[in-house]
Amino acid sequence: MPKRIPLTMNKPPQILILYAHPTPHHSRVNRRLAQVAAKVPNVQVHDLYELYPDFHISVRREQALVEQADLIVFQHPVQWYSMPALLKQWVDSVLTPGWAYGPGGEALRGKDFWLVATTGGSVRSYQAEGHNLFPFSAFLPPYQQTAQLCGMRWLQPHLLFGAHQVNQQTLAGHIEAYRKRLANYPNWPELLATDTPIPLTGS
Ligand SMILES: Cc1cc2nc3c(=O)[nH]c(=O)nc-3n(C[C@H](O)[C@H](O)[C@H](O)COP(=O)(O)O)c2cc1C
């Protein structure tokens, strides 16, 4: 695990949410998550599909934003067991060698990485007997290793399964849990005890 760089005491921790939803007007969950997150102090919701509908990402602008963040959040609906195409394009173009990884690539070192994602499939679908065949955790290693390669600490993902089916109460609880996590960062119980690695978990 990377060595933690302590957060500066006199500066509140900055949270950058890379929000990627190709059809936000059809969103039941992510749009509400993003709206609630945007009201939390020191959180910036960076709406990639709004900013870059043509997929022409400003690498310098994105790198500057990331550099000032302590916690980097990928928030998106799961599409084909992965992230939406524009977020993948963001990873491909912004996480450059010599900046994000490799010799001289220290820009992300010591930051925290948090995946916040929703699935259409239920928890039961993400098992050997279900139509998705694998537990959701089987789809996480590309995210985890990307974070690891860049020296970021992997935090336990915040996942909502069955996004179209969950009842209003479950949805409201999920959204409130997100708001609280953001508002309390970095004072999360599992982080207070660390330098121990945060386990990779899914369903
Ligand atoms: C192109 C596409 C691919 C999708 N792939 C998956 C998938 O691999 N696994 C899954 O559980 N749901 C999949 N879904 C369902 C979305 O994850 C689901 O609609 C979304 O999480 C709901 O969140 P929202 O209300 O914010 O849109 C897919 C949806 C679309 C449009």
Image (cartoon, helix red, strand yellow):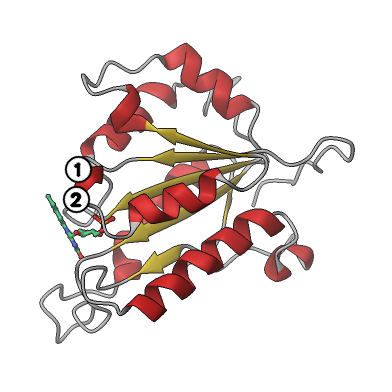
* Identity, as a three-letter code, of the amino acid under mark 1: Thr
The residue at the point 14 percent across, 82 percent down is 130
Residue that badge 2 annotates: 26
Relative to 37, is 146 on the left or the right?
Answer: left
Residue at x 73% of width, y 42% of height: 13
Alpha-carbon span between mark 1 and mark 2: 6 Å
Neighbours of disc 2 within 10 Å: few (<14), some (14-19), many (20+): few
User: Element type at marker 1?
Assistant: loop
- Mark 2 close to ligand 1, CB under 8 Å: yes
Q: Residue at x 82, y 35 (%)?
A: 11
Coordinates of residue 138 in the picture (x, y in percent): 30, 66
Asked if one can make out residue 142 in the rendered structure from this viewpoint, the answer is no
Residue for badge 1: 23
For the residue with label 1, is its CB less than 8 Å from the closest atom of ligand 1?
Answer: yes
x and y percent of residue 49 in the render? 29, 31
| Image position of 58 (left or right of 126) | right
- On screen, 97 above or below 16? above
Q: Amino acid at mark 2?
A: His
Picture mark count: 2
